[in-house]
Image (cartoon, grey):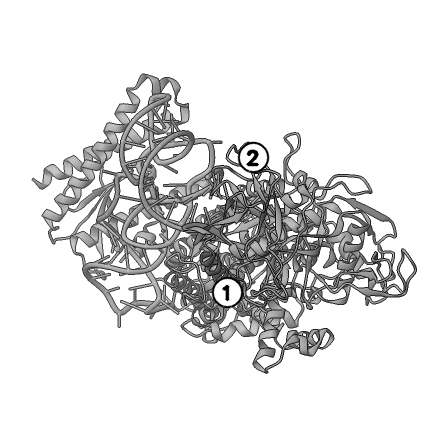
Amino acid sequence: MSKPSSSPDLPKAYDPSVIEEHWARYWVEEHLFDVPTPQSTQDNGEKFTILLPPPNVTGRLHMGHMLNQTEMDILTRWHRMLGDLALWVPGTDHAGIATQMMVERQLKEEGKTRQELGREAFTQRVWCWRKLYGGAILDQMKRLGASVDWSREYFTMDDRLSIAVKEAFIRLYEQGLIYRGAYIVNWDPSIQTAVSDLEVEHEERLGKLYHVRYPLADGSGSITVATTRPETMLGDTAVAVNPTDERYIALIGKTVRVPLTGVNGKPDREIPILADDWAKPEFGTGAVKVTPAHDPNDFAIGQRHHLAAPSILDETAHIALPGSPYNGLDRYEAREKIVADLEALGLLESIKDHTLTLGLSQRTGVVIEPRLSLQWFLAVNKTPNTGGKSIAQNAIDAVESMNGEKPAINFTPEMYKKIYLEWMTNIHDWCISRQLWWGHRIPAWHCKSCNQITVARDTPTHCEHCNSTDIVQETDVLDTWFSSGLLPFTTLGWPALTSTSPMSWIPDPHALTDDLANFYPTTLLVTGFDILFFWVARMIMLGCHFTLDIPMPDGSKRTLANAVPFKEVYIHGLVRDANREKMSKTKGNVINPIDIIERFGTDAVRFTLASMASPGTDIAFSEARTEGYRAFANKIWNAARFLFMNLDRARDAGYKITVKTPTNDPNQTPEPWALPEYTPLETRWIFDRLHAVSIEVDRALTNYRFDEAANAIYQFFWGELCDWYLELVKLRLVFPEYDFTKSTHNDTTALTLASLTGVFESALRLLSPFMPFLTEEIWHALYNQQPPAKSIALTRYPQPADFPADPIAASAMQTMQDLITTIRALRKDLGVPEKESTPINLHASNRIVALADANQDMLVRMARVNSMDFTAEPLSGTNARSTADFDVAVLYERQIDIPAERERLTKDLAKYEKGLEAANRQLSNESFMAKAPAHIVEGLRKQHAETKTLYDKTKAALDTLG
RNA sequence: AGGCGCGUAGCUCAGUUGGUUAGAGCGCUACCUUGACACGGUAGAGGUCAGCGGUUCGAAUCCGCUCGUGCCUACCA
């Protein structure tokens, strides 16, 4: 309770730049959204836990981040205001490849390479880099007003998270699910590391199909193979044909000489022709060259037939065959030269155009080279040696509904569930090793004596197999997504106190432990579909696999086996430009959120994104829309000015107005508004609307319908509160007298002031998750900078039960609005000057006559009516209008534009006629009458009657026009 | 090669199990600088719901085909 601020505090036009920075800083500095350990707060409340998809440290905020964070922030603020314990954990991802590339690029500018620096110095350099630039995106987040818990901020390479990654790796290894082996992987020759299947983008390109003749070793002829990559022939170890292919049956078992492979005077290499189903008779020549080290299919053939797999390309995709004339050539140079040489030898039969799908590295855009190399894999379809289901199976079970029950993890939109299951059902083992320096180093040591591997939590001194001390640590690091896949529980403190290792580095082990007990599993994940497989699927795989021992605050232990990391997944669309084009640097259509925020204000941009965020569709971001929402912010600002002005005047006149904001404590339900008998119609009505809009917003947000929630609030605030309620309130407060000292201090004035304040304050709270800055500013001003809570975000979210529903008032008000609108339109068509008041005649039911009579002041103010007569006879003619409920005539001497009026009436008549025909058709249709549900028939009858009335009235009006 | 989605007012999009006369914002037209607000007010115009066929008493909504468009997945040399 405090003195309201005076109106001069608020400038006439809303300027977001003046207030937003201040509140953004205030929220962080006051630690308003840091969640204390739950013992000290209400522990019977619901919990809402949400993990921010960690942006890359290399990242700059883009519109996708802003959409993602706006949605999460709306939900988090909403839950917090509902009294839930709302924890939103922020952090950043070390983003192995991306970051390493960034720093390497920087080194290159200095004329250095990472190899010159060495591993140790290079990683130091990356840490320095991350210190300098890594926080940029978090600073930008603060500008968005994201209500995260900054005290729990993490970085995926932090010590505690690194230990968790190591722990997870070791457990999986011990369960026999991580193995090391030589397989064909996707190799990026530009950054020289393996990447996973997901990090490869496929693109159709026009290439060539070469037919190459391989001479039979016995000189009896030749066999022609078809290939798109002639340069790999240097590594061929066989030619395969289909066993059923009659053309080649006689050749199976013979050998051919691979052209161009003779080195130093030696003859060309001799390789067998063998039978394998993989060779498809209908493709090319039906004979395929087999290069096990450079093609995944060929590798499989090689395995089946125990072929050697010589590598002919080095890690940079240059030919590595000492002595060969092609040695040192890039793969494409080699191709050119080999094709020319084959041609010269007369072994090149033909070259045909051929469209092929190329794999490109997502990060570098370089063509992926399938390469045989030693890598670490996570077996996803294998039963762990400790028993139980495979990782993929658990990840499927968590999402599939069992026995018709709701699945443990629910997807919105539902479509993504299908996509996820499809992918998870066909998943291959995951290559988790990367030949990078920046990342979590694999905790494995190779023994130089016995070649075996020792995997250990602490650096071992000797090989666990042969006791040799000649051991060296694995140089590979883990795929970044391996660590991010663990985040739902590692950010909450796992494996603190649950691990076999002491966790002495944890500053306050108990706090972290409580986090896991209190907040795991998390509630919701909000993200884009682009990381559905990369991240969402991996979190489900890893989360549902591990058994987590969770120490409870009371000292007991809870074991969570195969628990889901989150219960809900909400997938949003992509933010595109206004023309629905994908934003990209090359197209130059990237919108920088900070730029747009500076021009329109964060609130307006947030509201734009929310109001366009319809599930399952991308957002075509349009500035026009944002301009509209800036206008909305300005509208609210000015509505606040109107309120403050009246509160000032009231105060000057001796009124004492109490503002009251309910708390968000779920145990304390505020007293609902009790309206006395003398409450005016518009006040009953606005409370009814407030009741209705809180129902709608609650329903919409429950279903992730940010668009519907935003639109409902917009419509309420502008279309109902400002357009009608504020105008009508002037009747009680400022009309016809503006000077309160001269007006009577009657109950209605006081009630109206209190209602106006209460309604407006409630509307602010309703809006605050969407426009946190503006509402914070006005709310503090409302309390003259001494509010009952530190932030509007810490107050109660408006609930339907807080406001009295009043269907009778709602209906009466609707009639009054119809009447006012009809009179206004009529006045316009009659050419009545705006300021001139006119008498009206009204013909209507007794109920409506009584209503209009009781609310004459509304008609005076809103429709410039200066007197009203009621007629028993229906009204028609050029100065009258009819609705189904009433006829109204405006008495004005000037004549209406007859042709225009005739056109309008004719149009209406046609519309009614069409409606009548349709209704008649239905009502005389026996099947319809027999089969349609009663309320539909009833509704149609009513509509038919109304249309009939309108038709008749319009017809009469048209007849009088002549 | 498979799979998924989309096509509704000039533009960007809603339209919840089929049900009364299909909605919003922006834009457009006309009038109004009224003491909260011209980032405003008031009143309007604007759609054969891509096309064709089917199911139904009833279809923007369900089914089939055609056209257009976007995306994802895949080891065919």
Q: Is residue A721 left or right of residue A60?
A: left
Q: Which mark is residue A825?
A: none
Give the chain of mark 2. A
Q: Quadrant of the C terminus of chain A?
A: top left
* A693 or A312, nearer to the observer: A312
Give the chain of mark 1. A
Q: Residue at x 78, y 50 (%)?
A: A172
Q: Residue at x 46, y 63 (%)?
A: A605
Amino acid type assigned to the residue bearing label 1 in the image:
Glu
Locate residue A700, reporting x and y percent.
51, 47
Q: Is residue A546 left or right of residue A417?
A: right
Locate residue A602, reporting x and y percent.
49, 67
- For residue A422, which quarter of the picture? top right
Amino acid type assigned to the residue bearing label 2 in the image:
Ala
Residue bearing mark 1: A333
Q: Is residue B48 left or right of residue A366?
A: left
* Foreground: disc 2 or disc 1: 2
Q: Quadrant of the N terminus of chain A?
A: bottom right
Residue bearing mark 2: A250
